[in-house]
Image (cartoon, helix red, strand yellow):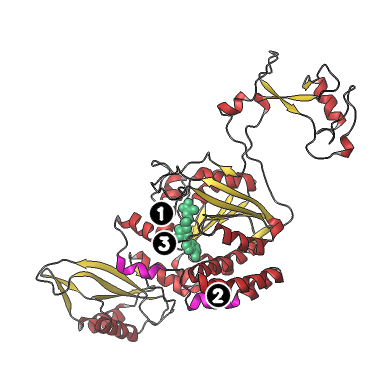
Amino acid sequence: MNRLYYGDCLTIMRDHMRLGSVELIYLDPPFQSNRDYNAIYKDETGRPLPDQINAFCDMWALNEERERALRTMPVLMREAGVEDEAVEFWKLWMNALRKTNPRLLAYLSYMVERLLLMKGILKPTGSIYLHCDPTASHYIKVMMDAIFGHDSFISEIIWNRAQAKGDSKRKFAANHDTILLYKNGKNFCFNPIYGDKGKDYRARFDRDDKDGRGPYHSAPLDSPSPRPNLTYEYRGYSPPANGWRVSQEEMERLDQDGRLILPAKKTQRIRRKLYMSEAPGPMIGDVWTDIGPLQSGQERLGYATQKPTQLLERIISASTNEGDVVFDPFCGCATTLEAAHKLGRQWIGIDIAIHAIKRVAKVRLQERLRLAEGEHFTIEGARDLWSRDKYHFQKWAVEQVDGFVTTRQSGDGGVDGRIYFAMPENDANKRRGLESMAIEVKGGKNVGINVVRELRGVLDNDGALLVGLIVMDPLGERKERNFREFMADAGDLDVLGDMVESW
Ligand SMILES: C[S@@+](CC[C@H](N)C(=O)[O-])C[C@H]1O[C@@H](n2cnc3c(N)ncnc32)[C@H](O)[C@@H]1O
């Protein structure tokens, strides 16, 4: 069954996904997380992220968690089969970046941890496409070479994602993304992709014998590389220096079918007729200029980093066949999942933002593709999330009430998030401007009075105007009454003369 997970792809890949189980991974990870988070928040609320909380969203700080990841990285790399030389290089590189660009180091270590897991999840015949931009594409390529091997690099795709715009007179306008394609083993799936037979392409078919077969163009039969086994003489025409492109049997078949152009002079080269009606179209190379940005309209879901479905359809068609499994560990609003579904592939998606998951499930999967949860796909729920990853359960719960998570991964002990609100500015209110409600989330069964005591402490010492407690299971009537009575002592909040309970 197709699966959509809410959570960090690191823990989900590690705990839930089978090794060697997917044919294609496409990832479009965040780089400037603040910008992404801002955009998502703005989509949902129509307002920009308040300045005060920008600091909560910085994923690329070299904090304790990142330092721990960096320490274990060489071991993880060796376990995943990365060559010793590449591991030693990574260690030197880490030391250099620590001094020169610690944010980039934090980002790269975040990516390496996840890419090592992706390598394991890919089938030996699978392929991986990593979507990035020139801010980090050259660093990422070095990492991909180390993890997948230099020999596994297949293509660097330049996607011309927009018209050049802006009015900088000091540099070229940035209007492309980079997509790196690697294979995971010796063999991999590749179905060539051809573009539309546009005017320029059609103009190449400039001959017509008026025999009903339509226009054709004259194509060479000389081999571009040496073919010593194809150096036969044909009807008095001596072989080209590198030999022919086709076997003698094929040459005879083409001849019988009237598809050869035989010049009068035997010293000239034989060519073949390529008919427009039989040609597949222009071959798509590694510079993609024919897929534009999302236009406003039906496709646009209002998700800031949404990619066009056509882009994903091309990738999936090139590197998978029907029935194969496509996996997107940073699926956002699920462009990959829709493209995979349309092309008859199975899919798995993960995203850490509940806004994304909600929108995907409702608009993309249910309304647009008419897929029913439980029947065609599953979404991993809160209870499962709690047993899997306590921190992400807390984050999920906070985001459910439109709050912002605190970055500290403290598990228990500490406020898990905040909801920000503006107090009306008038004389009746003693406090003004942006205030917050501190949120505590409890997923376990034994929620005791100590939790409420701690929340009272937050109210007294933390500057929060309100506190809130989210629990996974009902407290029971008696406990709920006790909690309410205890918190009633904290007092009421008077806003514009209306009484607002503080619990
Ligand atoms: C650039 S967007 C992907 C957009 C997507 N390709 C689309 O067309 O909608 C990156 C996504 O990664 C998600 N994300 C960030 N960190 C993540 C993590 N550790 N695990 C899973 N998803 C993550 C973000 O919430 C965001 O939706």
Q: Residue at x 68, y 48 (%)?
A: 189
Q: Give yes or no for contact between labels 2 and 1 (Cβ–Cβ under 8 Å).
A: no
- Quarter holding the N terminus is bottom right
Which residue in the protein does label 1 denote?
359
Q: Residue at x 19, y 74 (%)?
A: 501
Q: Give yes or no for contact between labels 1 and 3 (Cβ–Cβ under 8 Å).
A: no
Which residue in the protein does label 2 denote?
69
Given the image, on which type of amino acid does mark 3 rest? Ile
Q: Is mark 2 within 8 Å of ligand 1?
A: no
Between 257 and 245, the one nearer to me in the picture: 245
As measured in the structure, the alpha-carbon distance from the residue carrying label 1 to the one carrying label 3 is 8 Å
Q: Choose mark 2 or mark 1, whichever is in front.
A: 2
Q: Is mark 3 within 8 Å of ligand 1?
A: no
- Quarter holding the C terminus is bottom left
Which structural element holds mark 2?
Answer: helix
Please say whether residue 163 is one of the residues in the magenta stretch. no
The x and y percentages for residue 416 are 37, 75
Residue 85 appearing in the image = yes
- Considering only vertical position in the picture, is 448 above or below 183? below
Which residue in the protein does label 3 denote?
354
The number of numbered discs placed on residues in the rendered structure image is: 3
- First reached walking from the N terminus: tag 2 or tag 3: 2
The x and y percentages for residue 367 are 42, 47
Q: Is residue 460 left or right of residue 116?
A: left
Which picture quadrant has residue 138?
bottom right
Given the image, on which type of amino acid does mark 2 rest? Ala
Which structural element holds mark 1?
Answer: helix
The x and y percentages for residue 196 are 57, 32
- First reached walking from the N terminus: tag 1 or tag 3: 3
- Considering only vertical position in the picture, is 67 above or below 108? below
- Considering only vertical position in the picture, is 292 above or below 270? below
The x and y percentages for residue 287 are 58, 43
